[in-house]
Image: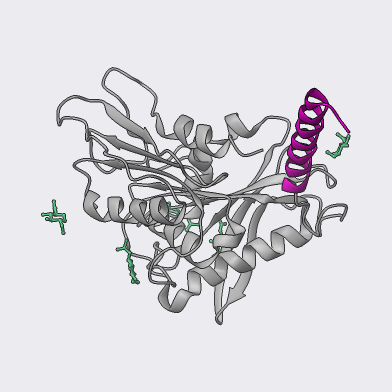
Amino acid sequence: MPSLPQILLLAAAAVATNLVCLATAATKPSSGCGKSPPTLTAGGNHTLTVNDKSRWYLLNLPAAYNNTHPYRLIFTLHAAGGNSSMVAAGQGGYLPWYGLPPYTADSLGAIYVAPNGLDRGWANRGGEDVTLISEIARSIKSDFCVDESLVFSVGFSYGASMSYALACGMAEQFRAVAVQSGGNMSGCATGTLRQPVALYGQHGVDGDLNITTARAIRDQFVAVNGCQPSTTVAPAVGSGSHTKVEYQGCKEGYPVTWIEYDGGHTPQPRDKGQTVTFAAEETWKFFGQFK
Ligand SMILES: *[C@@H]1O[C@H](CO)[C@@H](O)[C@H](O)[C@H]1NC(C)=O
Ligand SMILES: *[C@@H]1O[C@H](CO)[C@@H](O)[C@H](O)[C@H]1NC(C)=O
Ligand SMILES: *[C@@H]1O[C@H](CO)[C@@H](O)[C@H](O)[C@H]1NC(C)=O
Ligand SMILES: *[C@@H]1O[C@H](CO)[C@@H](O)[C@H](O)[C@H]1NC(C)=O
Ligand SMILES: *[C@@H]1O[C@H](CO)[C@@H](O)[C@H](O)[C@H]1NC(C)=O
């Protein structure tokens, strides 16, 4: 019969083995791994037809794309009045690809996709924009090497609303979404979020889109992700600061982080005296915790 210390050792070994299994099982190489992409210069403009409508997106591959390396896949969605080119170039208020590439230039790397909305927005009529992104994801995953457990969406305003719609409609495909100054203009196919998806949210206390709706969206993630509700404190108007809450008790792998800032409707909110937005860094802190 094993002695007590031996039993503890065996138990520790079992836990360690499980941890290793979890870490390994977490990588889900897509069917595009090992495949040569259709053209090696596959970055740039891509077109497809969805519901009889011609649609397009910009694709940005890592400089030294390696077809056996499973990359993160990050969707970057423009706001109302925006387009894919503005997100890619960092024009009209955005940082290029929401300011994430400097952070994702690590050992994992990332493939970026900026889909273009219809009429410069994401009305998602009849779910057509969720279908678009689902089709793009399918095509990228089958042509390129993606870690299917590391798929993300970030967007500001209408792009945030659409990221919420993706969490509702494609929960099983998204590791996390970043809803920056979101509203509910793209809807939620399931009425309310039904499956857990990790959430990073930020919203200005005096933004154009009512913060009450943004908090209601957040609370759907808090509930479905199993987090304990928490009191959040809005920063005082005029303080030039932001407050951040990391919800506790969420299901493993489904955290929620929420920031309210003193300011209006902008993709690049800044604290008083700062020259750089906290949005990119905080979004990355959130996405980057998933390996
Ligand atoms: C991408 O191609 C589509 C379809 O030809 C076109 O409408 C769109 O303007 C192009 N985008 C860019 C950035 O060139
Ligand atoms: C490509 O990625 C694979 C898997 O991550 C790695 O083993 C290999 O060394 C990489 N090749 C190059 C040339 O970096
Ligand atoms: C994107 O919007 C900018 C600003 O309105 C415009 O100059 C540019 O032509 C648009 N690009 C495409 C491809 O529609
Ligand atoms: C968003 O709109 C949809 C209707 O499309 C509704 O079912 C859902 O509950 C709304 N979500 C929030 C947070 O108000
Ligand atoms: C935001 O919505 C809440 C609840 O519907 C409402 O009480 C409040 O007046 C709205 N705020 C603004 C600025 O429209």
Q: Looking at this rendering, what residue extends furthest in the top direction?
A: 273
Q: Position of residue 168 (x, y in %)?
A: 47, 64
Residue 69 appears in the figure? yes
Residue sitting nearer the eye, 6 or 251:
6
Secondary structure, magenta segment, majority class: helix
Asked if the stretch drawn in magenta spans residue 7, the answer is yes
Q: Position of residue 57 (x, y in %)?
A: 58, 59
Determine the residue positioned at 32% across, 28% down: 270
Q: Looking at this rendering, what residue extends furthest in the front direction?
A: 1
Q: Looking at this rendering, what residue extends furthest in the bottom direction?
A: 52
Quarter of the rendered structure image containing ligand 1? bottom right
Which quadrant is home to the N terminus?
A: top right
Residue 210 appears in the figure? no
Q: Which residues are magenta?
A: 1-26
Determine the residue positioned at 45% across, 32% down: 282
Which quarter of the picture shows residue 23?
top right
Residue sitting nearer the eye, 121 or 154:
154
Which quadrant is home to the C terminus?
A: top right
Which quarter of the picture shows residue 231?
top left
Determine the residue positioned at 47% across, 30% down: 281
Q: Position of residue 36 (x, y in %)?
A: 86, 54
Residue sitting nearer the eye, 139 or 165:
165
Asked if the stretch drawn in magenta spans residue 141, the answer is no
Tell me: residue 224, above or below residue 118: above
With 95 as the anchor, is 31 left or right in this view? right
